[in-house]
Image: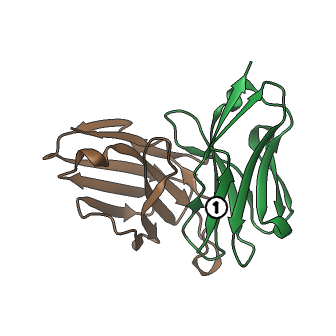
């Protein structure tokens, strides 16, 4: 079965610093991979997706992620953090042909002024 | 337009009440989903509708009853809920590709449900 591991339930960075949120998946074949962001008391917003095209995926709000098959990873990065980036971030995976998303446990990102 | 709308935003109900949550999308997506999310946890899948037919029920108690009247609407009927059912209920939709393959899911803002 698919599974997703997000390393670090809480990440804290200074404003302007690099953001790195880690996600590793388990799958015997390249899956579809997604990053979602959830602001307090809101639904989930799609940041970016990997669907077997380019391995470096650019998303909204300056985020990007790189699919590395050899490491079964899909880490999310942003060069310079803004206060508005403070939120919960979920990595998710689905098999090709599947209708289910399997979510990681989430990483809460805090931005320090 | 990548918007999924949900009503109401907040709902407080007693354990003997009957209420419904509503979800609507106009993106032409043929898959719609209900999720339950507890605080500080990821969403948990409850139901999936594909082409207006229930395709996945994640062993959800019968006090939750989904309905998909048409390709744009999804309801969740609630009856005799328990306090532990208090949570954020999220609706999502996604396009369906070849052979029923799902793609990215678009989520609504959720309904915050409190059962007293």
Number of callouts in the render? 1
* Residue named by callout 1: A4
Q: Is residue B31 left or right of residue B34?
A: right
Q: Is residue B103 visible?
A: no
Return the residue nearer the eye: A19 or B74. A19
Q: Label 1 neighbourhood size at 10 Å, few (<14), some (14-19), many (20+)?
A: many
Which residue is painted at 32% across and 55% down in the image?
Answer: B76
Which residue is painted at 33% across and 64% down in the image?
Answer: B60
Q: Position of residue A22 (x, y in %)?
A: 74, 50
Which chain is the one coloured green? A
Quadrant holding the N terminus of chain A: bottom right
Return the residue nearer the eye: A108 or A39. A108
Which residue is painted at 81% across and 44% down in the image?
Answer: A77
Say how the picture is coloured.
Answer: by chain
Q: Is residue B35 left or right of residue A7?
A: left
Q: Is residue B49 visible?
A: yes
Judge whether A61 appears above or below A100 on screen.
above
Q: Is residue B105 left or right of residue A68?
A: left
Q: Chain of mark 1?
A: A
Return the residue nearer the eye: B1 or A81. A81
The tint chain B carries is: brown
Quadrant holding the C terminus of chain A: top right
The residue at the far bottom in this view is B99
Q: Position of residue B19 (x, y in %)?
A: 23, 47
The residue at the far left in this view is B16
Q: Position of residue A10 (x, y in %)?
A: 64, 38
Look at the numbered disc 1 and give the secondary structure of its residue.
Answer: strand
The residue at the far front in this view is A8
Q: Position of residue A68 (x, y in %)?
A: 84, 63
Quarter residue B45 falls in: bottom left
Judge whether A82 appears above or below A18 on screen.
above
Q: Is residue B34 left or right of residue A100?
A: left
């Amino acid at each position: 079965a698919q599974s997703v591991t997000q390393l670090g339930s809480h990440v804290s960075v200074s404003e302007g610093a690099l953001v790195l949120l880690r996600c590793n998946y388990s799958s015997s074949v390249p899956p579809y991979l997604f990053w979602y962001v959830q602001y307090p008391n809101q639904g989930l917003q799609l940041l970016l997706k990997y669907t077997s095209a380019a391995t470096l995926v650019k998303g909204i709000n300056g985020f990007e992620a790189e699919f590395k098959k050899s490491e079964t990873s899909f880490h999310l990065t942003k060069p310079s953090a803004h206060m508005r980036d403070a939120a919960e971030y979920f990595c998710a995976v689905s098999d090709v042909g599947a209708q289910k998303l399997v979510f990681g446990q989430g990483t809460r990102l805090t931005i320090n002024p | 337009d990548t918007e999924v709308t949900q009503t109401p935003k907040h709902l407080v109900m007693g354990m003997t009440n009957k209420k419904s949550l509503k979800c609507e999308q106009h993106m032409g997506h043929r898959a719609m989903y209900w999720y339950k999310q507890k605080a500080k946890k990821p969403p948990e899948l409850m139901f999936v509708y594909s082409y207006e037919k229930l395709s996945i029920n994640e062993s959800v108690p019968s006090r939750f009853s989904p309905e998909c009247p048409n390709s744009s609407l999804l309801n969740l009927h609630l009856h005799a809920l328990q306090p532990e059912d208090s949570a954020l209920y999220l609706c999502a939709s996604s396009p369906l590709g070849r052979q029923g393959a799902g793609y990215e899911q678009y989520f609504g803002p959720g309904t915050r449900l409190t059962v007293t």
